[in-house]
Image (tube, helix red, strand yellow):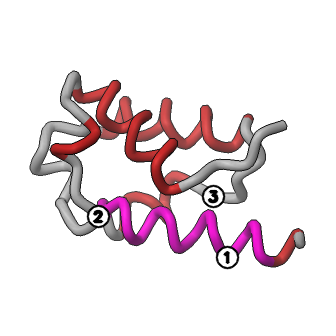
């Protein structure tokens, strides 16, 4: 199983929003960019399948890539 990276998460979000990864900044509010709760649930599920320890509620509290990456990175550090 390949570990998630900040850039792979950015690419997944961009793909979901039909945008270029270059257009997704770490501190963008992803809901303002068009991400809705259904798409967020799909991303959370996809990332859990890739081994990330995260929950929808954790992601919904702060809809930025920086926040989401901090959750994933903490989980990866615990497993190392």
Q: Does residue 25 appear left or right of residue 78 in this picture?
A: left
As drawn, 62 above or below 43:
below
User: Which residue lies under the disc numbered 1?
Assistant: 74
Residue 40, how many percent across, how many down?
Answer: 40, 40
Closest to the observer: 48 or 79?
79
Question: Which residue is drawn at the image coordinates 55% and 42% (left, top)?
Answer: 44
Q: Earlier in the sequence, mark 1 or mark 2?
A: 2
User: Which residue lies under the disc numbered 2?
Assistant: 26
Q: Which residues are magenta?
A: 63-77
Mark 1 or mark 2: which is in front? Answer: 2
What numbered label is drawn on residue 58?
none
Residue 8, how many percent across, how many down?
Answer: 51, 42
Mark 3 or mark 1: which is in front? Answer: 1
User: Which residue lies under the disc numbered 3?
Assistant: 54
Q: Quadrant of the N terminus?
A: top right
Residue 67 lies in magenta, yes or no?
yes
Determine the CA span between mark 3 and mark 1: 10 Å
């Amino acid at each position: 199983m390949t570990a998630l990276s900040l850039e792979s998460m950015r690419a997944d979000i961009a793909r979901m929003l039909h945008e270029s990864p270059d257009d997704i900044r770490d501190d963008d509010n992803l809901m303002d960019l068009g991400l809705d709760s259904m798409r967020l649930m799909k991303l959370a599920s996809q990332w859990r399948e890739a081994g990330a320890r995260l929950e929808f509620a954790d992601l919904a509290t702060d809809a930025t890539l920086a926040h989401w990456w901090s959750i994933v990175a903490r989980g990866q550090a615990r497993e190392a």
